[in-house]
Amino acid sequence: MMKEPLVYVNGKFVGRSAAVVSVFDHGLLYGDGVFEGIRAYGGNVFQLDAHIGRLYDSAKYIQLEMPMPRDELVEAVLATLRKNQLRDAYIRVVVTRGTGDLGIDPSSCKRATIFVIAEPAVSILGSKGPKLHNLVIASVRRDSVDATSHEVKSLNYLNSVMARLEATNAKANDAIMLDSRGFVSEASATNVFMVKEKKVSTPATSAGILHGITRAVIIRLCSDLGFDVTERDVTPFELLTSDEVFLAGTKGEIVAIGSISGKRIGSGGVGPMTRRLYQEFARFVQRKDQGTPIYEAESVRI
C-alpha cells in the first residue's frame, strides 16, 4: 500500500486524509488569508527566502499576525519535503486568519491557521521547448490596487476563477485580464511578457499585478542577456500586435502564447526570445545559489 503523504498543520505532521481545518475558519468562510506556491528543483527550494518574504508582506498588508517567525516557517517547509522524501516538488504554504465567529470581524479569530502541502512535480523545463497555449482576453477585470489588490497573494481568487471559467468556456488555455483602466494586467495566475522588435515589455505593478518571483527572475535574465526590458503600461493593441507573448509563474514556469482571442501572435509558434529565456530559466533554477537545500538541515526537527 502506498504511504499517505504528510501535511504540516499547525506544528504537526498528519496524513493527507486527516489534514483538515474548521468550517469556522475565516480562510474558508471569507477567503481571509494568504498563501505562496513554491517549487523545489533537484533537492533545492527555488527562491525560498523571496517567497517567504512575500508571504509575510501579504500578511502584513491584511493585518494577519503570522503564527511563527520566518526562520521557523522555512524549516517547516523543508521538513515537509523531507518527511515526504521529495526533491522535485510543488509546495503550497497557506496561512488563514484562523477559527472565528460567523461574522466578518476578524477579532474573533484568536490564532492563525497554517499548513504546508508538498507534492511531487515534474518540471517542463529542459524539454524541447515551452508549451504553446492559446488565450482569450477576459471580460472580467483585474481588481484595482485600491480594492482587493492582487499585489497581495490572498486566498480570495474569485476574480481569477471567473476569468479562467471564461477561458474554459471559450476553449482557451487561460485568460488575459485587463486592469480597471483597460491596460493589460496579467493572466489568471501568471505574469505576462511581450516582445516587439526585440524589446521585452511586462505590465507595471500599477496594473494591479502580483509581484511575481518568476517575473523578477525573467527581468533579471533579460538584463543579463542584454535584452531591452521595460516595466510599463501595455495596451491590448500592443499585446495583440506583438511578435511574441509568454506567461511566467512558479507552477506554470514559462508558457509561450500562439494566439489571443483568435488573433495569431507573431508566427503563431514559440518565438526565438521566448525560447532563449526558457532555456536560460531552465539553467537558472538549477543553480545552487538560487535555492535552499532540503537535505542539508536534517538535524532540524519540526
Image (spheres, helix red, strand yellow):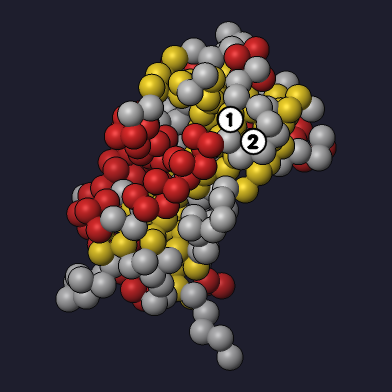
Q: Nearer the viewer, residue 211 or 128?
A: 128
Q: Decide if residue 257 is on the left or right side of residue 10.
A: right
Q: Is residue 237 above or below residue 40?
A: above
C-alpha span from label 1 to label 2: 5 Å
- Residue 243's quadrant in the figure? top right
Q: Decide if residue 254 is on the left or right side of residue 71.
A: right
At a point 56% along the width and 55% down the height, the residue shown is: 128
Residue 13 appearing in the image: no
Which residue of the protein is positioned furthest toward the left in this rendering?
299
Secondary structure beneath label 1: strand
Q: Is residue 202 above or below residue 224?
A: above
Q: Is residue 262 above or below residue 108?
A: above
1 and 2 marks in contact (CB < 8 Å):
yes
> Split into 4 quadrants, where in the image is the C terminus?
bottom left
What residue does disc 1 label?
Answer: 245
Q: Nearer the viewer, residue 8 or 255?
A: 255
Q: Is residue 18 above or below residue 281?
A: below
Q: What amino acid does circle 1 point to?
A: Val
Q: What amino acid does circle 2 point to?
A: Ile
At a point 34% along the width and 34% down the height, the residue shown is: 225
What residue does disc 2 label?
Answer: 257
Secondary structure beneath label 2: strand
Task: Please count the marks in the image.
Answer: 2
At a point 49% along the width and 34% down the height, the residue shown is: 273
Residue 173 appearing in the image: yes
Q: Nearer the viewer, residue 238 or 18?
A: 238
Q: Badge 1 local density, few (<14 within 10 Å), some, or many (20+)?
A: many
| Residue 108: image location, x then y, percent | 42, 40
| Residue 170: image location, x then y, percent | 82, 35
Q: Decide if residue 244 is on the left or right side of residue 171.
A: left
At a point 52% along the width and 79% down the height, the residue shown is: 4
